[in-house]
Amino acid sequence: MADLMAMKPYFVHESAYVDDNVEIGEGTKIWHFSHVQSGACIGKKCVLGQNVNVGNNVRIGDFVKIQNNVSVYEGVILEDYVFCGPSMVFTNVNNPRSKYPQVGSQFYLKTLVKEGASLGANCTIICGHTIGRFAFVGAGTVVTKDVPDFALVVGNPGRIVGWMSEAGKKLVFGQDGIAMCEKSGKRYKLENGAAKELP
């Protein structure tokens, strides 16, 4: 068993479960007590922490980090470089009832988390929404609507309180509507209530 595991181009801890019909990219690490369900596709060089559940048919891009105690339910798509903080929550049904179960992909609302977005510890993403590129959802936030690219969202319900650079620095816009990331040197423009990276 150990020899077979050593031959794989990814790492799965001996306490984790990986179902049949799963794709896992090179260099990905899946840690203690995690479960990857059938039909899931995980990209390269991802890290899944302790007690992570990846549901059926979930799509996860490259370089994604999912911290401890996160369940990525069917209907969720994570693009490259997404960060999921510890114990954050996804949903996939808006009006669940135990007495009237809604099981099957036809009931699941899609949630898309775009490239580079960060989802803070204990935040909740209500299904059916899109989290924009490099958006930053603060710890404990409840997201009830789409989040634009580069937006910093906090509170319950989540509201935009600022803007973040690709490198994760808060942007301060001048009177000309331009801001520069002190970490990367990239420039951003605030226009019509949305931030965008300048060429």
Image (cartoon, rainbow, N blue to C red):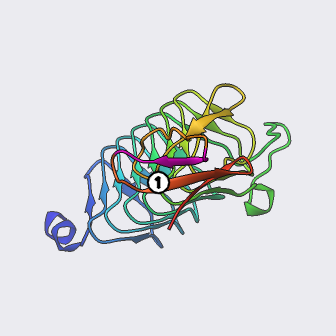
196 or 10, nearer to the observer = 196
Q: Does the magenta stretch include residue 119?
A: no
In percent of width and height, residue 28 lies at: 31, 62
In the picture, measured across the screen, residue 93 lies left or right of residue 51, that is right
Residue at image location 75% in from the left, 55% down from the top = 108
Q: Is residue 180 magenta?
A: yes
Residue 39 sits in which quadrant? bottom right
Q: How many labels does the image show?
A: 1
User: What segment carries the magenta color?
Assistant: 176-182
Residue at image location 31% in from the left, 63% down from the top = 45
Q: Residues within 10 Å of mark 1 (few under 14, many from 20)?
A: many
Give the farthest residue toward the front. 176
Type of the residue with mark 1: Val
Relative height, residue 10 to residue 86 (above, below): below
Residue at image location 84% in from the left, 37% down from the top = 99
In percent of width and height, residue 37 lies at: 50, 59
In percent of width and height, residue 21 lies at: 48, 73
- Quadrant position of the N terminus in the picture: bottom left
Q: Name the residue under label 1.
A: 82
